[in-house]
Image: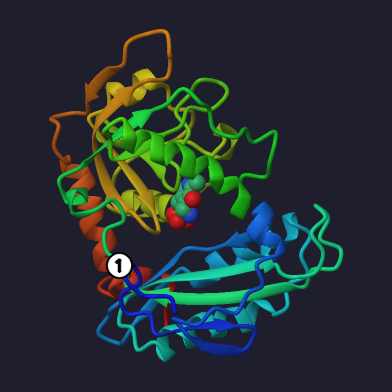
């Protein structure tokens, strides 16, 4: 029996066409993905709207999912349309009005050589209610710590793919940042510029313009990031995509993380522990409180995902 302590609202998960009770386990311990991280996943949110729950940018998430699977040379067991239908079904079946949805495709039980030649590719989808990813403090703004280890470089792996094993780097440095007393980690890339958080992008605001980086800076170009850039332009803000140096970040008027889990979370303090030979420094961002443009974007995003802005209805897939 597996308790649902950290998965409020989760009743059933879907695996290869069958719903299982949340408390039920169905995998063999020698499944390939458990040993080598040979999986790909998506993080998707559905929001409560007046027309029932709506999934935010579902086709874009599933396209990224299928791209990630192709990087792992997987033959997906279901089509794009079937996966989209399954995500909607899982939210309905769990009776959720808002949800965090987790599709996972993985090399399952077969052989245990690094090459999964006898392992079937299996698909799993779960959903539950996941509140603020970085805790209740997220509203007031969070702290981030730049650690010494650099982000996996885009010359080493396809950064457009969300691959299970690659997230071990996110876990290690997410733990390290918290052990140092900060809310989240922040990676530099090999060039020494600011890359991203372990599971989120970073954007800055300077003189009214919203700036972020792109895939040439060793980041996953998040769907939330790209949506926020579009929303910022719609609100009349200039946007700009290019490298972000540490100096740009420390001198920014405002900074915030974006991601499906964190949504839009202000960053109000950044610690620089990037050089183990130099004492750590702390940099307050702007006023040390969530800035006005950050709050405006956060509000606009919250309205859009809840079906409150007809211009952005195109981003919603209704569940019922
Ligand atoms: N970077 C990384 C490493 C991530 O894991 C995520 C979360 N998927 C993001 C950025 C943000 O992406 P999205 O907005 O598509 O959730």
Q: Within 8 Å of ligand 1, the CB of disc 1?
A: no
Q: Give the color scheme: rainbow, by chain, secondary structure or one colour.
A: rainbow
What residue is at 41 percent from the left and 55 percent from the top?
224
* In-front residue for pair 243/166: 166
* Residue 275 rendering spot, x and y as whole percentages: 43, 14
Classify the position of the N terminus by image quarter: bottom left
* Residue 296 rendering spot, x and y as whole percentages: 20, 51
* In-front residue for pair 269/233: 269
Please say if 18 is above or below 62: below
What residue is at 64 percent from the left and 36 percent from the top?
154
- Sort mark 1 into few (<14), some (14-19) or many (20+) by Cα contacts within 10 Å: many
Q: Dot 1 lies on which element?
A: helix
What residue is at 65 percent from the left and 83 percent from the top?
16
Instruction: Please indicate whether residue 164 sits to the left or right of residue 290 in the image.
Output: right
What residue is at 32 percent from the left and 71 percent from the top?
5
Q: Residue furthest top?
A: 277
* Residue 12 rendering spot, x and y as whole percentages: 45, 85
Q: Residue furthest right?
A: 117
Q: Is residue 319 visible?
A: no
Which residue matches tag 1? 304
Task: Examine the image and state in which quarter residue 239 appears.
Answer: top left
Please say if 235 is above or below 120: above
* Residue 320 rendering spot, x and y as whole percentages: 40, 91
Instruction: Please indicate whether residue 102 sits to the left or right of residue 260 in the image.
Output: right
Q: Is residue 62 visible?
A: yes
How many numbered discs? 1
Task: Examine the image and state in which quarter residue 146 appears.
Answer: top left
Instruction: Please indicate whether residue 78 sits to the left or right of residue 75 in the image.
Output: left
């Amino acid at each position: 029996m597996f308790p649902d302590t950290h998965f409020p609202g989760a009743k059933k998960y879907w695996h290869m066409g069958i719903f299982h009770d949340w408390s039920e386990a169905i995998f063999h311990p020698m499944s390939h993905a458990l040993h080598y991280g040979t999986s790909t996943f998506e993080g998707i949110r559905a929001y409560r709207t007046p027309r029932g729950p709506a999934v935010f940018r579902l086709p874009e998430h599933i396209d990224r999912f299928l791209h990630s699977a192709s990087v792992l040379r997987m033959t997906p067991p279901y089509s794009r349309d079937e996966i989209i239908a399954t995500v909607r079904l899982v939210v309905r079946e769990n009776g959720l009005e808002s949800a965090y949805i987790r599709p996972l495709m993985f090399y399952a039980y077969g052989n245990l050589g690094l090459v999964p030649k006898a392992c079937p590719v299996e698909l799993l989808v779960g959903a539950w209610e996941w509140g603020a990813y970085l805790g209740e403090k997220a509203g007031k703004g969070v702290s981030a710590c730049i650690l010494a280890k650099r982000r996996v470089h885009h010359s080493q792996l396809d950064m457009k793919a969300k691959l299970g094993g690659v997230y071990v780097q996110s876990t290690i440095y997410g733990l390290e940042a918290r052990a140092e007393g900060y809310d989240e980690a922040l990676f530099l890339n090999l060039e020494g510029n600011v890359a991203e958080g372990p599971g989120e992008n970073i954007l800055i605001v300077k003189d009214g313009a919203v700036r972020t980086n792109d895939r040439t800076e060793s980041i996953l170009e998040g769907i939330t990031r790209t949506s926020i850039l579009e929303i910022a332009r719609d609100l009349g803000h200039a946007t700009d995509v290019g490298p972000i140096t540490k100096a740009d970040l420390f001198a920014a008027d405002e900074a915030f993380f974006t991601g499906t889990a964190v949504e839009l979370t202000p960053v109000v303090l950044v610690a620089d522990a990037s050089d183990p030979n130099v004492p750590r420094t702390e940099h307050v961002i702007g006023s040390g409180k969530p800035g006005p443009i950050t709050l405006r974007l956060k509000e606009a995003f919250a309205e859009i995902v809840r079906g409150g802005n007809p211009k952005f209805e195109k981003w919603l897939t209704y569940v019922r």
